[in-house]
Image: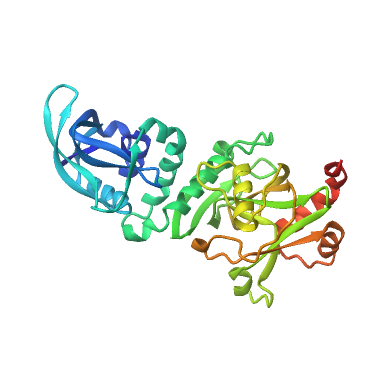
Amino acid sequence: MSDLFFYGTLRHLPLLERVLGRPLQDISVQSAVLPDHAVHAVKGQDFPMILPLSGDSAHGVFVQDLSSEDLARLAFYEGAFDYDLTPVTVDLHDGNKREAKVFFPAPGSWKPDGQWSLQGWADRVGDITALAAEEEMAYFGRIEPEVMAGNIRAIQTRAWAKILADKRRTGDPRDTNKDVIVHRHDRAYVNYFGMEEVDLQHRQHDGSMGPVLHRGSLMQGSAVSVLPYDPARDTVLVVEQFRPPAFLINDPEPWLWEAVAGMIDPGEEPEQAAHREAMEEAGVKFDRLEYAGGAYSSSGSSTGFMYLYVGLGDLTHTTNTGGLDTEGEDIRSQILPFDAFIDMADRHVFKDVQLVALAYWLARHRDRLRV
């Protein structure tokens, strides 16, 4: 059995519970301090790092009697962040000193960036990180920590999408706690996207429980799609980029015209994502956004939910170099008169469903927006 000292995100007990895979009442936790050390934020990251600093103290928790299984789970979780266990002596709140091990960052892995606040972190992304850990730890013993490291951002995006989904209530009186029975739920695959499988029953329209269904779903985060519109000039901006899925299905024209679109980052509101993506993909700023609704893009096979907007602003320039190099994006934009744009929609030139939906929403609301 081993004792560990946690100074960072694992002080957040809901996260620790998910990483260890057992309830908090089974875990011995007490406050502790590591003398002559300080906890710093990591530049460009949400998690912290610890560094020796004479006269300072790192506050945290002392967790006793961790099993070899616990240590393996912790090594898997922390290993994705390039941290290693190091022995230290900590001061407990009762005045006693105890030997413990601490996850220290590998030398040169991260750059410190000021003080780090557990409460500030918890307020921003605590719920997201704890929920993401459920998916991460489902692959413990199945993939290497280095592989998991490449999936963490996408997993956190999906965790945030689950939190956003819980807010999408329309008044349906049915209760999934009573009207859905889950017999099996497996996380089958992860490689940026996730694939989950479930055996379940749901209440049918006649009030009875239906048969057990065996279903799989492509797990995705939430996204935004925003159509830039200039009401003064009555013009629309569309973007074009190569789409591998269209190529893989043998579409001979996999360069698709689309509205500006992108994933909603963890902790980001849909409106913030709409403004950010417009600048990244097309260099466009909006005076305001009009919400055009939201919907699942393919509810029978994917969790992807799209928030739709029309962004109002001046459209005066296009680009052939839009997007982020880090994401392999190669985007060009084009400004179209509204009449030409809606004619292209009517002639089925556009193959992107979000662009088609936004085209007809704009057609319905265009007179109001031009006043």
Image location (x, y in percent) of residue 350: 75, 65
Image location (x, y in percent) of residue 149: 37, 56
Left or right: residue 315 versus residue 97 is right
* Point 32% across, 48% down: residue: 111
* Residue furthest to the top: 94
Image location (x, y in percent) of residue 295: 68, 49
Decide: is 229 above or below 251.
above
Decide: is 50 above or below 322.
above
Q: Quadrant of the C terminus?
A: top right
Of the pair 286 and 300, the residue shown nearer to us: 286
Left or right: residue 46 versus residue 20 is right
Of the pair 46 and 18, the residue shown nearer to us: 46
Decide: is 232 above or below 338.
above
* Point 36% across, 33% down: residue: 118
* Point 78% across, 68% down: residue: 349
* Residue 195 in view of the camera: yes
* Residue 298 in view of the camera: no
Left or right: residue 284 versus residue 98 is right
Image location (x, y in percent) of residue 169: 65, 36
